[in-house]
């Protein structure tokens, strides 16, 4: 039985008519960048998140970059963030000439260790980027109490409750996300009207009115086609997230007697949207090969923690500096959890994992 890590073809069969109608609407309008489609999608995401301002941008990576630009982050500044995340989290910091200060993780949740983060605050700290990793929203209250701007990286937490946007929260609509575009797209949620206005200015080369540039921004605009497709898929998001949760709970039941360390749910309802189901696996590489031989796709998020990435070696981080992040990187394995999974597929995955650990190693 083949079990893909992601199955966008099956998803398309269920929502394809709505997507095609949205695409035709854009082509018939002749308006392909920003415009009414983008405004409508911004309004929908703002309502969903319960945050007043939503600014659509070209990708989740650009959302992080643009948010830091709006805060004036630059050379000499420090930005604190988690060592276990996708590269874009730290890449945005370095692209602006600032220094990433990496923290260890909470080994139970994979999210940033708040105590470690607070202990790394200095006079140079200009922002903190907590990552809501794998769809589980972290409690940012202690971080917000510092008064330091918090840019939440919620790329994997679309549709989750608990996003604060103090002052920014960034989303990604990369095709594999819980709500995915037909290409790259992102969003910044903002709690302050003046900062939202600055984001809108910077996303279009700092221009307002046309050809009058008040700041040096960039081309961070969302395409109307992506906004229309995302709007067509948005009504299905709640159901998709509910199915992800059901799949996660089924895995937890079936795998409870294995040596795997299973991911924990959030104690607050709706604060986990299960973008990934990531276990800690003894003999991970052997298990992954075993599953691959049985056509079960898995992935490692992420094999090299950010502080050990070669491009960040100039800051002198050594192996052993952040032990929880490093240990997680050697053990984590993502199992298929997408909403198109069938009960038979989940049972098959679990059965194969149980069988693997029954064998002598």
Image (cartoon, rainbow, N blue to C red):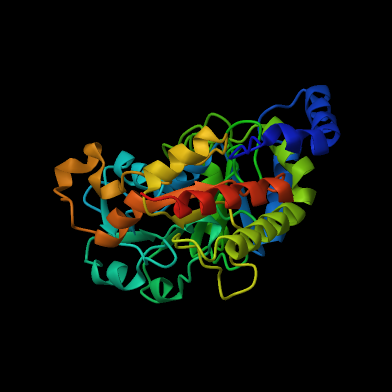
* Horizontal relation, residue 224 to residue 268: left or right: right
Quarter occupied by residue 4: top right
For the point 34% across and 63% down, the residue is 105
Q: Give the quadrant of the N terminus.
A: top right
For the point 82% across and 29% down, the residue is 20
For the point 68% across and 48% down, the residue is 42
In terms of depth relative to the viewer, which is nearer, 74 or 79? 79
Q: Examine the rendering and report whether any part of residue 88 can be seen.
A: no
* Horizontal relation, residue 198 to residue 302: left or right: right
In terms of depth relative to the viewer, which is nearer, 296 or 326? 296
User: Residue 214, relative to residue 353: is it above or below?
Assistant: above
* Horizontal relation, residue 10 to residue 300: left or right: right
Quarter occupied by residue 129: bottom left
In terms of depth relative to the viewer, which is nearer, 360 or 255? 360
Indicate the position of residue 175 as horizontal and vertical percent values: 61, 37
In terms of depth relative to the viewer, which is nearer, 41 or 354? 354
Indicate the position of residue 333 as horizontal and vertical percent values: 45, 49
Instruction: Please give the count of numbered marks on the rendered protein.
Output: 0
* Horizontal relation, residue 12 to residue 307: left or right: right
For the point 70% across and 38% down, the residue is 227
Quarter occupied by residue 140: bottom left
């Amino acid at each position: 039985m083949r079990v893909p890590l992601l199955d966008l073809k099956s998803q398309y069969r269920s929502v394809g008519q709505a997507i095609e109608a949205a695409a035709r609407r854009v082509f018939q309008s002749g308006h392909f960048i920003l415009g009414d489609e983008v405004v409508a999608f911004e309004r929908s995401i703002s309502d969903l998140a319960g945050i007043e301002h939503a600014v659509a941008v070209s990708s989740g990576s650009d959302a992080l970059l643009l948010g830091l630009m709006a805060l004036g982050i630059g050379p000499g500044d420090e930005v604190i963030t988690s060592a276990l995340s996708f590269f874009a989290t730290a890449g945005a910091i370095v692209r602006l000439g600032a220094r990433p200060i990496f923290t260890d993780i909470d080994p139970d949740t994979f999210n940033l260790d708040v105590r470690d983060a607070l202990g790394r605050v200095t006079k140079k700290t200009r922002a903190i980027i907590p990552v809501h990793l794998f769809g589980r929203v972290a409690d940012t209250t202690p971080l917000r109490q510092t008064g330091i701007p918090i840019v939440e990286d919620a790329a994997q937490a679309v549709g989750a409750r608990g996003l604060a946007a103090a002052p920014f929260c960034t989303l990604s609509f990369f095709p594999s996300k819980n709500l995915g575009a037909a290409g790259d797209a992102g969003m910044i949620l903002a709690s302050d009207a003046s900062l939202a206005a600055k984001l809108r200015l910077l996303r279009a080369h700092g221009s307002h009115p046309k050809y009058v540039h008040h700041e040096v921004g960039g081309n961070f605009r969302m395409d109307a086609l992506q906004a229309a497709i995302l709007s067509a898929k948005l009504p299905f998001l709640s159901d998709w997230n509910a199915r992800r949760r059901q799949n996660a709970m089924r895995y937890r039941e079936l795998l409870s007697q294995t040596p795997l360390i299973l991911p924990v749910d959030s104690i607050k309802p709706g604060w986990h949207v299960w973008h990934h189901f990531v276990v800690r696996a003894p003999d991970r590489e052997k298990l992954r090969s075993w599953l691959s031989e049985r056509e079960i796709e898995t992935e490692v998020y992420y094999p090299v923690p950010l502080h050990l990435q070669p491009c960040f070696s100039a800051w002198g981080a050594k192996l052993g500096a952040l032990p929880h992040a490093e240990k997680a990187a050697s053990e984590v394995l993502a199992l298929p959890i997408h909403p198109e999974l069938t009960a038979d597929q989940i049972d098959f995955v679990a059965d194969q994992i149980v069988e693997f650990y029954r064998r002598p190693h």
